[in-house]
Amino acid sequence: MNFEIQQKITIKDVLSQTRALISYNEARILLQSVLKINHAHLIAHSDQYITLVQIHTFLSLVKRRANGEPIAYILGECEFYSIRFIVNSSVLIPRPETELLVDLALEKISLNLPCKIMDLGTGSGAIAISIAKHRPISRITATDNSTDAISVAKTNARHLGTNNVNILQSNWFDKLEKEKFDLIVSNPPYIALNDPHLNQKALNFEPKIALIAGEDGMECIRTIITTSTSHINAGGWLLVEHGYNQANICNWLLKNAGFSNIFSCSDLAGILRVSGGRYMPNF
Ligand code: GLN
Protein backbone atom coordinates (compact mmCIF):
# COMPACT_ATOMS: atom_id res chain seq x y z
CA MET A 1 0.00 0.00 0.00
CA ASN A 2 1.61 3.18 -1.01
CA PHE A 3 -1.07 5.81 -0.94
CA GLU A 4 -0.26 8.90 1.01
CA ILE A 5 -1.83 9.31 4.39
CA GLN A 6 -3.32 12.77 4.46
CA GLN A 7 -3.84 14.72 7.63
CA LYS A 8 -7.57 14.89 7.14
CA ILE A 9 -9.30 11.88 5.75
CA THR A 10 -12.90 10.82 5.98
CA ILE A 11 -14.42 7.38 6.40
CA LYS A 12 -15.58 7.50 2.79
CA ASP A 13 -12.13 8.46 1.47
CA VAL A 14 -10.20 5.85 3.40
CA LEU A 15 -12.59 3.17 2.18
CA SER A 16 -12.31 4.22 -1.44
CA GLN A 17 -8.50 4.16 -1.23
CA THR A 18 -8.43 0.47 -0.31
CA ARG A 19 -10.65 -0.58 -3.21
CA ALA A 20 -7.78 -1.99 -5.27
CA LEU A 21 -6.66 -4.20 -2.39
CA ILE A 22 -9.76 -5.75 -0.86
CA SER A 23 -13.51 -5.65 -1.44
CA TYR A 24 -15.53 -2.68 -0.21
CA ASN A 25 -17.52 -4.96 2.08
CA GLU A 26 -14.43 -6.38 3.76
CA ALA A 27 -12.87 -2.92 4.06
CA ARG A 28 -15.93 -1.49 5.75
CA ILE A 29 -16.13 -4.46 8.15
CA LEU A 30 -12.48 -3.88 9.13
CA LEU A 31 -13.00 -0.14 9.46
CA GLN A 32 -16.10 -0.67 11.61
CA SER A 33 -14.04 -2.84 13.94
CA VAL A 34 -11.31 -0.19 14.22
CA LEU A 35 -13.80 2.63 14.80
CA LYS A 36 -16.05 0.38 16.96
CA ILE A 37 -19.14 1.41 15.04
CA ASN A 38 -21.85 -0.53 13.22
CA HIS A 39 -22.73 -0.49 9.53
CA ALA A 40 -25.56 2.02 9.91
CA HIS A 41 -23.27 4.42 11.79
CA LEU A 42 -20.58 4.07 9.13
CA ILE A 43 -23.04 4.97 6.37
CA ALA A 44 -24.60 7.83 8.31
CA HIS A 45 -21.22 9.36 9.21
CA SER A 46 -19.19 8.62 6.11
CA ASP A 47 -18.01 12.26 5.93
CA GLN A 48 -16.57 12.11 9.44
CA TYR A 49 -12.79 12.48 9.80
CA ILE A 50 -10.81 9.69 11.36
CA THR A 51 -7.53 9.99 13.24
CA LEU A 52 -4.10 9.03 11.96
CA VAL A 53 -3.85 6.27 14.54
CA GLN A 54 -7.15 4.84 13.32
CA ILE A 55 -5.96 5.04 9.72
CA HIS A 56 -2.74 3.21 10.56
CA THR A 57 -4.57 0.51 12.49
CA PHE A 58 -7.08 0.10 9.67
CA LEU A 59 -4.35 -0.13 7.01
CA SER A 60 -2.51 -2.80 8.96
CA LEU A 61 -5.71 -4.88 8.97
CA VAL A 62 -6.27 -4.24 5.25
CA LYS A 63 -2.72 -5.44 4.61
CA ARG A 64 -3.37 -8.69 6.48
CA ARG A 65 -6.57 -9.28 4.52
CA ALA A 66 -4.86 -8.45 1.20
CA ASN A 67 -2.29 -11.08 2.17
CA GLY A 68 -5.05 -13.71 2.30
CA GLU A 69 -5.68 -13.95 6.04
CA PRO A 70 -9.33 -14.82 6.72
CA ILE A 71 -11.36 -11.93 8.05
CA ALA A 72 -12.48 -14.00 11.06
CA TYR A 73 -8.88 -14.30 12.29
CA ILE A 74 -8.26 -10.59 11.74
CA LEU A 75 -11.36 -9.66 13.71
CA GLY A 76 -10.80 -12.49 16.19
CA GLU A 77 -14.41 -13.54 15.91
CA CYS A 78 -16.90 -15.32 13.70
CA GLU A 79 -20.65 -15.82 13.71
CA PHE A 80 -22.00 -19.36 13.76
CA TYR A 81 -25.58 -20.40 14.43
CA SER A 82 -26.31 -16.70 15.15
CA ILE A 83 -23.80 -16.75 18.01
CA ARG A 84 -20.56 -14.76 18.00
CA PHE A 85 -17.54 -16.96 18.73
CA ILE A 86 -13.98 -15.93 19.48
CA VAL A 87 -11.55 -17.56 17.05
CA ASN A 88 -7.81 -17.53 16.50
CA SER A 89 -5.37 -19.44 14.33
CA SER A 90 -5.38 -22.46 16.67
CA VAL A 91 -8.98 -23.30 15.68
CA LEU A 92 -10.80 -23.82 12.42
CA ILE A 93 -13.13 -20.99 11.45
CA PRO A 94 -16.65 -22.42 11.87
CA ARG A 95 -18.21 -22.90 8.42
CA PRO A 96 -21.84 -22.11 7.56
CA GLU A 97 -22.34 -25.68 6.25
CA THR A 98 -21.55 -27.02 9.72
CA GLU A 99 -24.79 -25.43 10.93
CA LEU A 100 -26.44 -28.46 9.30
CA LEU A 101 -24.74 -30.68 11.87
CA VAL A 102 -26.20 -28.56 14.67
CA ASP A 103 -29.67 -28.59 13.04
CA LEU A 104 -29.58 -32.40 12.81
CA ALA A 105 -28.28 -32.74 16.37
CA LEU A 106 -31.09 -30.56 17.71
CA GLU A 107 -33.63 -32.72 15.83
CA LYS A 108 -32.39 -35.74 17.76
CA ILE A 109 -32.49 -34.15 21.22
CA SER A 110 -35.73 -33.34 22.95
CA LEU A 111 -36.00 -29.97 24.70
CA ASN A 112 -37.63 -31.65 27.70
CA LEU A 113 -35.35 -34.63 28.27
CA PRO A 114 -31.85 -34.28 29.67
CA CYS A 115 -29.48 -35.94 27.20
CA LYS A 116 -25.78 -36.61 27.31
CA ILE A 117 -24.06 -35.28 24.22
CA MET A 118 -20.48 -35.51 23.03
CA ASP A 119 -18.69 -33.24 20.55
CA LEU A 120 -15.42 -34.71 19.30
CA GLY A 121 -12.76 -32.28 18.04
CA THR A 122 -14.62 -29.22 19.23
CA GLY A 123 -12.11 -26.55 18.09
CA SER A 124 -13.63 -23.19 18.98
CA GLY A 125 -16.49 -25.00 20.72
CA ALA A 126 -18.97 -23.63 18.16
CA ILE A 127 -20.92 -26.88 17.69
CA ALA A 128 -20.99 -27.87 21.36
CA ILE A 129 -21.95 -24.40 22.58
CA SER A 130 -24.64 -23.91 19.92
CA ILE A 131 -26.23 -27.21 20.91
CA ALA A 132 -25.86 -26.40 24.61
CA LYS A 133 -27.60 -23.03 24.18
CA HIS A 134 -30.59 -24.66 22.47
CA ARG A 135 -30.83 -27.64 24.83
CA PRO A 136 -30.22 -26.13 28.28
CA ILE A 137 -31.14 -29.23 30.30
CA SER A 138 -28.82 -31.48 28.32
CA ARG A 139 -25.14 -31.84 29.19
CA ILE A 140 -22.50 -31.57 26.52
CA THR A 141 -18.95 -32.87 26.78
CA ALA A 142 -16.53 -31.45 24.22
CA THR A 143 -13.01 -32.69 23.58
CA ASP A 144 -10.12 -31.60 21.44
CA ASN A 145 -6.58 -32.87 21.25
CA SER A 146 -5.14 -29.36 21.03
CA THR A 147 -4.69 -27.50 24.33
CA ASP A 148 -4.75 -24.18 22.43
CA ALA A 149 -8.13 -25.08 20.94
CA ILE A 150 -9.38 -26.11 24.38
CA SER A 151 -8.47 -22.71 25.75
CA VAL A 152 -10.43 -20.98 22.91
CA ALA A 153 -13.46 -23.25 23.48
CA LYS A 154 -13.37 -22.60 27.24
CA THR A 155 -13.14 -18.85 26.68
CA ASN A 156 -16.16 -19.02 24.37
CA ALA A 157 -18.18 -21.09 26.85
CA ARG A 158 -17.34 -18.61 29.62
CA HIS A 159 -18.06 -15.47 27.56
CA LEU A 160 -21.33 -16.91 26.34
CA GLY A 161 -22.38 -17.97 29.83
CA THR A 162 -22.77 -21.62 28.82
CA ASN A 163 -22.74 -23.77 31.95
CA ASN A 164 -23.92 -27.10 30.51
CA VAL A 165 -20.72 -27.75 28.52
CA ASN A 166 -17.70 -29.55 29.89
CA ILE A 167 -14.61 -28.95 27.75
CA LEU A 168 -11.55 -31.14 28.13
CA GLN A 169 -8.34 -32.02 26.33
CA SER A 170 -8.53 -35.55 24.95
CA ASN A 171 -7.56 -37.38 21.80
CA TRP A 172 -11.10 -38.35 20.73
CA PHE A 173 -12.48 -40.56 23.56
CA ASP A 174 -9.11 -41.32 25.21
CA LYS A 175 -9.80 -39.50 28.49
CA LEU A 176 -13.41 -40.62 28.77
CA GLU A 177 -12.90 -44.21 29.92
CA LYS A 178 -16.27 -45.96 29.76
CA GLU A 179 -18.52 -42.89 29.62
CA LYS A 180 -21.51 -43.23 27.27
CA PHE A 181 -23.61 -40.64 25.45
CA ASP A 182 -27.04 -40.39 23.81
CA LEU A 183 -25.68 -38.38 20.90
CA ILE A 184 -22.18 -38.03 19.52
CA VAL A 185 -21.41 -35.30 16.98
CA SER A 186 -18.19 -34.41 15.22
CA ASN A 187 -16.79 -32.18 12.53
CA PRO A 188 -13.38 -33.85 12.35
CA PRO A 189 -10.57 -33.16 9.89
CA TYR A 190 -11.56 -34.85 6.63
CA ILE A 191 -9.51 -33.39 3.78
CA ALA A 192 -7.17 -35.78 1.93
CA LEU A 193 -3.47 -34.98 2.20
CA ASN A 194 -3.10 -34.16 -1.50
CA ASP A 195 -6.48 -32.54 -2.06
CA PRO A 196 -6.03 -29.47 -4.33
CA HIS A 197 -8.60 -27.69 -2.10
CA LEU A 198 -5.71 -27.27 0.35
CA ASN A 199 -4.00 -24.90 -2.10
CA GLN A 200 -6.52 -22.19 -1.28
CA LYS A 201 -4.62 -19.37 0.37
CA ALA A 202 -7.10 -18.87 3.21
CA LEU A 203 -6.62 -22.49 4.34
CA ASN A 204 -2.91 -21.80 4.93
CA PHE A 205 -3.89 -19.74 7.93
CA GLU A 206 -5.94 -22.52 9.52
CA PRO A 207 -4.48 -25.35 11.61
CA LYS A 208 -3.56 -28.23 9.29
CA ILE A 209 -4.31 -30.65 12.09
CA ALA A 210 -7.97 -29.55 12.01
CA LEU A 211 -8.23 -30.01 8.24
CA ILE A 212 -6.16 -32.94 7.01
CA ALA A 213 -6.88 -36.58 7.82
CA GLY A 214 -4.35 -38.82 6.09
CA GLU A 215 -4.08 -40.03 2.50
CA ASP A 216 -7.81 -40.36 1.87
CA GLY A 217 -9.10 -37.82 4.40
CA MET A 218 -10.93 -40.62 6.25
CA GLU A 219 -8.43 -41.34 9.01
CA CYS A 220 -10.31 -39.47 11.76
CA ILE A 221 -13.82 -40.39 10.61
CA ARG A 222 -12.83 -44.08 10.57
CA THR A 223 -11.53 -43.83 14.15
CA ILE A 224 -14.60 -41.93 15.32
CA ILE A 225 -17.11 -44.36 13.79
CA THR A 226 -15.35 -47.48 15.01
CA THR A 227 -14.69 -46.22 18.55
CA SER A 228 -18.07 -44.53 19.04
CA THR A 229 -19.85 -47.83 19.57
CA SER A 230 -18.14 -48.17 22.99
CA HIS A 231 -19.37 -44.70 24.00
CA ILE A 232 -22.93 -44.58 22.77
CA ASN A 233 -26.04 -45.65 24.62
CA ALA A 234 -28.40 -48.11 22.91
CA GLY A 235 -30.74 -46.04 20.74
CA GLY A 236 -28.25 -43.16 20.61
CA TRP A 237 -27.12 -41.37 17.45
CA LEU A 238 -23.78 -40.59 15.84
CA LEU A 239 -23.62 -37.66 13.40
CA VAL A 240 -20.45 -36.82 11.47
CA GLU A 241 -19.64 -34.04 9.04
CA HIS A 242 -17.61 -35.15 6.02
CA GLY A 243 -16.26 -34.14 2.61
CA TYR A 244 -18.23 -33.87 -0.64
CA ASN A 245 -17.27 -37.41 -1.77
CA GLN A 246 -17.29 -39.26 1.56
CA ALA A 247 -20.99 -39.99 2.17
CA ASN A 248 -20.85 -43.52 0.70
CA ILE A 249 -17.80 -44.58 2.66
CA CYS A 250 -19.26 -43.09 5.84
CA ASN A 251 -22.50 -45.04 5.31
CA TRP A 252 -20.49 -48.20 4.75
CA LEU A 253 -18.38 -47.62 7.90
CA LEU A 254 -21.51 -46.92 9.95
CA LYS A 255 -23.15 -50.12 8.71
CA ASN A 256 -20.05 -52.17 9.48
CA ALA A 257 -19.82 -50.71 12.97
CA GLY A 258 -23.38 -51.88 13.69
CA PHE A 259 -25.36 -48.66 13.19
CA SER A 260 -28.85 -48.67 11.69
CA ASN A 261 -31.19 -45.95 10.38
CA ILE A 262 -28.18 -44.68 8.42
CA PHE A 263 -28.68 -41.49 6.45
CA SER A 264 -26.80 -38.66 4.72
CA CYS A 265 -27.98 -35.09 4.49
CA SER A 266 -27.08 -32.31 2.03
CA ASP A 267 -25.96 -28.82 2.99
CA LEU A 268 -27.40 -25.68 1.40
CA ALA A 269 -25.01 -26.08 -1.55
CA GLY A 270 -26.57 -29.50 -2.25
CA ILE A 271 -23.45 -31.40 -1.12
CA LEU A 272 -23.89 -34.50 1.06
CA ARG A 273 -22.26 -33.11 4.19
CA VAL A 274 -23.42 -35.01 7.27
CA SER A 275 -23.99 -38.74 7.72
CA GLY A 276 -25.30 -40.49 10.77
CA GLY A 277 -26.82 -43.58 12.23
CA ARG A 278 -28.49 -44.98 15.30
CA TYR A 279 -26.80 -47.49 17.54
CA MET A 280 -29.23 -50.31 18.40
CA PRO A 281 -26.98 -53.20 19.48
CA ASN A 282 -29.80 -55.44 20.77
CA PHE A 283 -32.14 -55.30 17.82
N1 GLN B 1 -15.22 -27.91 5.32
C1 GLN B 1 -13.88 -27.44 5.55
C2 GLN B 1 -13.25 -26.96 4.26
O1 GLN B 1 -13.62 -27.46 3.24
C3 GLN B 1 -13.03 -28.52 6.17
C4 GLN B 1 -13.47 -28.79 7.53
C5 GLN B 1 -12.94 -30.04 8.08
O2 GLN B 1 -11.99 -30.65 7.61
N2 GLN B 1 -13.58 -30.45 9.11
O3 GLN B 1 -12.41 -26.11 4.25
Image (spheres, grey):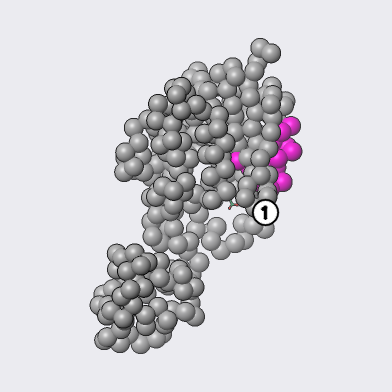
> In the image, 199: left or right of 147?
right
In percent of width and height, residue 5 lies at 32, 85
The quadrant of the rendering that contains the N terminus is bottom left
Residue 56 rendering spot, x and y as whole percentages: 31, 75
Q: Which residue is mark 1?
A: 195
Q: In this rendering, does residue 116 appear at all?
A: no
Q: Is residue 138 above or below residue 25?
A: above
| Residues shaded magenta | 241-252
Q: Residue at x 66, y 40 (%)?
A: 265
The number of discs equals 1
Say which amino acid is labelled 1: Asp
Q: Residue at x 41, y 47 (%)?
A: 83
The quadrant in which residue 105 appears is: top right
Q: Say which residue appears at 40% left-offset and 36% top-offset.
A: 133
Q: Nearer the viewer, residue 157 or 24?
A: 24
Q: Quadrant of the C terminus?
A: top right
**Residue shown at the point (38%, 56%) measured from the top left:** 76
Q: Report x, y in % for residue 25.
A: 46, 70
Relative to 151, does residue 117 appear above or below in the rendering?
A: above
Q: Position of residue 198 (x, y in %)?
A: 61, 57
266 over 165 or under it: above or below = below
> Picture quarter containing residue 64?
bottom left
Q: Magenta stretch: residue 247 in it?
A: yes
